[in-house]
Amino acid sequence: MDQKELWQAVLAQIQLQISPPNFATWFKSTQIVSQENGFIFVSVPNSFTKEWLEQKYNKAIFKILYNLNRGIKGVKYEVEKSGLQPLKKFPIYSPVPSKQLDFQDLKVEGDTGLNSRYTFDNFLVGDFNELAHAAGCAVTQDPGKVYNPLFIYGGVGLGKTHLLQAIGNEVIKASNKKVRYVPTEKFVSRVISAIRNHKIEEFKAAYQKIDVLIIDDIQFLTGKEKTQEEFFYIFNSLYEKNKQIILSSDRPPNAIPALTERLQSRFGGGMITDISLPSLEARIAILKNKCDEKKASLPDDVLEYVSSNIKKNIRELEGALNTLIAYQKINDSEIDIKTTKNLLRNIISSSNKIINAKKIIHSVADFYDLKEKDLISSSRKREIVLPRQIAMYLLRQELKASYPFIGRKLGGKDHTTAIYACEKISKEIEKNENLTEEIELIKQRVLCG
Ligand code: ADP
Ligand code: MG
């Protein structure tokens, strides 16, 4: 295995541990330049990155390298000598030189925002995503006509971005329609800067030329009123012209907090479909497909181990696979189950994370866009009381916690309050489908987040 492959193996694992913007900021333009006496020398674009990697990520980087090769003693970071290679800073979603394979995920073409790596061909279809896939295909064949808007929701790492991008790529292949993919965070920051520069009218005018507008992770519009207003305008004007709008979110429209009612009803006006968790068979199939794609093969028991332990996130499945393939290449031999377990210790234990009270409270607060301290306050406001009761319910369900414990964890409430909350939510779930679904989504977050 060469240095490049070794570094890719590190990146594959790091990528699972930190957010995409952080990953792009700190790991872009990094590479292994040499290995000497057990030390790995990594070149970085500037001294700021050097400091950051040394202080924040060195431990994680070293651990991964050490797991791959016990001979490694340490990692040193060196600022790339200027003059040899120009120091370039690439904004997260803009084009990156193609030879930097490590950043495939961030590479997009032209101003469409699309990345050609996401296609229908490499998107595996199973029970868990069948409907979303079918709706996506229908939209591709007749944009703006069948399902408008198309709203796809589901947990982290389950293929929303892949599907959205595949739709965009397919439309471009089949027609000369103008497609634009924009992550919501990016949309928000563009609106803000357009307002600041008095260019909001030009901004909106530019969107009028688009035939297929794809906005990813729309839950990030939460609480951004001004942006919601501008988006509402763009949405309506495209919609009226029968232009296709495709949206994704980690939850259904009616569960996005602080989303104006008019947007909520717009989002629900077309087709809403979800991507759920892949079955064991689907997970094995995904792994096998990806092995073929990468022209690698892993023993059956290894594939089985991976797919039965990583259940909730396809990105994690991929990350695990990359790690194992890298190991096989380094050692030039077939990996066994014992080594697999060792290499994947981190990913798998974080995947089957131990649930604790803190995590539940945090996930509930996060889901409803509240602060944890509101949740444990004594406020009687409805928008706080219900989430608090849900947190109590989840503590009981997931941890089998005692009522006095639950009361204490939520800011010293009496155990009778906890009993009341658990009973109320249990009853409510039976007749309120939305609530059931919200609680499911929160549970997924507790496990994944
Ligand atoms: P999300 O946007 O829902 O968080 P992504 O679309 O980013 O998830 O998917 C995470 C990773 O898993 C990507 O690398 C993607 O290519 C892969 N992936 C997701 N779903 C599938 C699928 N059905 N078939 C093949 N790969 C998939
Ligand atoms: Mg995504």
Image: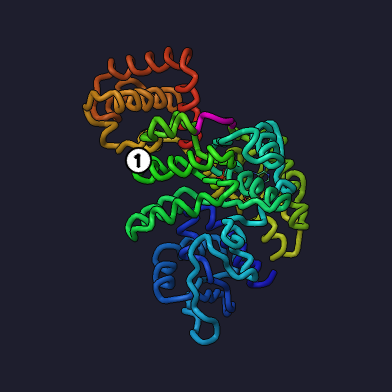
Asked if residue 248 can be seen in this view, the reply is: yes
For the record, the magenta segment spans 267-273
The residue under the point 24% across, 20% down is: 414
Left or right? Give the position of 254 relative to 66.
Answer: left
Residue visible at 48% across and 71% down? 89
Does residue 271 show up magenta in the picture? yes
* Neighbourhood count class around disc 1 (C-alpha, 10 Å): few under 14, some 14–19, many 20 upward: some
Residue 425, position in %: x, y? Answer: 40, 17
Q: Please give the count of numbered marks on the rendered protein.
A: 1
From this view, report whether residue 397 is shown above or below residue 7.
above
- Residue behind mark 1: 223
Q: Is residue 314 above or below residue 269?
A: below
Q: Position of residue 408 (x, y in %)?
A: 27, 27
* Residue 95: quarter of image: bottom right
362 above or below 63?
Answer: above
**Which image quarter holds the N terminus?**
bottom right
- Of all residues shown, which one is farthest toward the left? 378
The vertical placement of 288 against 260, above or below, is below
Check disc 1 and give the amino acid type.
Gly
User: In the image, residue 233 lies at what x, y percent?
Assistant: 43, 42
